[in-house]
Image (tube, rainbow, N blue to C red):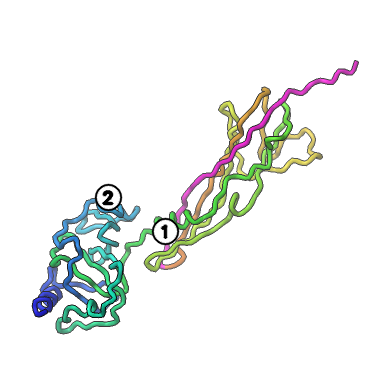
Amino acid sequence: MALVLAAASQVAADGPGGGVQCPPKVLDCDLSATDPGTGGNDKPAKPGAGGGGGGGTRGCDIDGEEVPCSSELGTFNDVDKCYWRLMEPQPTDPAEYERAATPEGWKYGDPGKLYNLTCPGRQLMGGLTVSVDGPQGPAIDPEVLAREAMEKLTLRPPSIASPRGDGKYLVGMPMWMWVERSASTWGPTSESASAGGVTVTATATVDRMVWKMGGGTSVTCNGPGTPYTKDQGMKSSPTCGHKYEKPGSRTVEVTAHWEVDWEVTSGGADSGTLTTTRSNEVEVALNEAKALNTR
């Protein structure tokens, strides 16, 4: 026990870099000399190293050298340049929170949660276990949360109202094309994702519809199209239509191009736009008009 206490005191009082630094806004650190299972002589990780990959477009660094913002070591804290990983499962024995004596001038507060602390390039006696509210600092990439929110969205393929598979269409006659609108097939629809005190909300809306008419021909429509009514007669659609010149069977495919606008709604200020698509298709038959024999 004396050896453990002495080791803990040495870590706090004589640790590399002038001692162990509490995360920002955390005044009381609970330190225990425990082995994190990864050793304490880690060198700075290279970009893309570790199981978690990079941290998005913002990046993290140690003395100017880029490192992943998250990896198997945990979440990178850009202030103390260490990785914080929540211990799973959390210890249930109260003695785990009080294993090491606190050096003079330090004190225990509410144990909170235990995190394993690993600082690449600095020898920390095999790592530390720190009891605080969690990692502090700009380690959350809002675009990652935006993509999580986008994955929650229910975005369905376009609901084709016309042309219908059982419809009757003639060569040379205007074909009116339109889709049914709903929150899941047209938008707007929203979802949110949160992590580390940051919340991002993503809102999706269809930007345009691209119709592939077969034979290499495509039509881009900026709206859902205009429904045909009998009083339109032989007119062409004012918003989304096509005219075939040859008879036969055609596969008509329509693709909805979604724009997903996201913004940080809590814990920061940032925004951006992501895109995705959904497609549907229908088989249509085209016939030639037959002239009536009036003899």
Residue drawn at x 27%, y 57% is: 72
For mark 1, what is the residue?
145
Compared to 148, does 21 lie above or below?
Answer: below
Q: Amino acid at mark 1?
A: Leu
Judge whether 29 appears above or below 57 on screen: below
Q: Amino acid at mark 2?
A: Gly
Q: Is residue 285 left or right of residue 209?
A: right
Q: Nearer the viewer, residue 90 or 262?
A: 90
Q: Closest to the observer: 217 or 289?
A: 289
Splitting the image into 4 quarters, where does residue 235 fall?
top right
Residue extent of the magenta highlight:
267-295
* Camera-side residue of 82 and 231: 82
What is the x, y in percent for residue 70?
Answer: 29, 58
Residue located 15% across and 65% down the image? 126
Label ID, residue 103: none
Residue underneath mark 2 = 48
Image position of 3 with respect to 16: above or below: below
Image quadrant where residue 7 sits: bottom left
The x, y position of residue 172, in whole percent, is 72, 26
- Check disc 1: other Cα within 10 Å, few if <14, some if 14-19, many if 20+: many
